[in-house]
Image (tube, grey):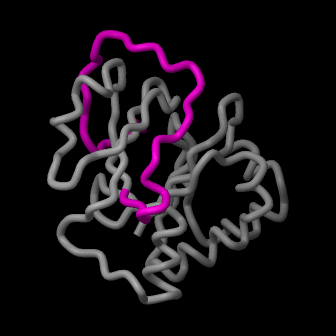
Amino acid sequence: MNILFIQREGTDLHHTLFASETSRLALRFYHPKKMPCGVYVSVSTLGSALSLVSELKWYIRRYVREVLFEIERGIFCTHQLAQDVYYERAVVLGASWKFRRLYGFRNGQMVSAVVMTPGSVIEDYRRDVIGADTAIEVWCREDEVEDIALEDQEPEESAGLKPGELES
């Protein structure tokens, strides 16, 4: 299980987390990796991932655009869906999921967010993520599936889209 903290524009989340004694203590047993889009943390279980996110709540509100949980290589889920799976036990994730979004990143910045139709794959959205060098599939709840607003969304030539692979 991995957590991806997508930083807000203009924030160096890795530096911010390690500049604070409180967040350094919360992260002391983990080895966060700095990514162009934020911070990537490996944990053992969904429960420990949700616990860590809870401990970092103050930082998340101020410096994080979105918290995602990697449930399978290249497939992430939202915080709300992860809570439904773990706490409510109302949701059982299967081989595919009906409510999905596709996030495209270029140089560490999110440049596109597209709602995916059921049964589609990332390759079906190559035109929608033009200019992205990385794309990830994000599973979400039905009430979260709507488009999200992005700043600075200007299409460019495709720079070798790699589904599910985050830059390091």
* Residue 104: percent from left, percent from top: 39, 33
Residue 61, placed above or below residue 38: below
Residue located at (46% from left, 41% from top):
147
Given residues 137 and 40, the one toward you in this image is: 137
Query: Which quadrant would residue 126 be assigned to in this image?
Result: top left
Query: Taking 47 as reference, is 100 left or right?
Result: left
Q: Which residues are magenta?
A: 139-168
Residue 81 position within the rendered picture, expressed as x and y whole percent measured from the top left: 46, 70
Instruction: Judge from the rendering whether residue 126 lies leftward or rightward of residue 82; answer left or right.
Output: left
Q: Is residue 143 left or right of residue 10?
A: left
Q: Residue furthest top?
A: 157
Q: Main secondary structure of the magenta part?
A: loop
Residue 52 lies in what quarter of the image?
A: bottom right
- Left or right of residue 114, residue 159 in this image: left
Relative height, residue 166 to residue 32 (above, below): above
> Residue at horizontal 42%, vertical 37%?
113
From the viewer's side, name the closer residue of 25 and 113: 113
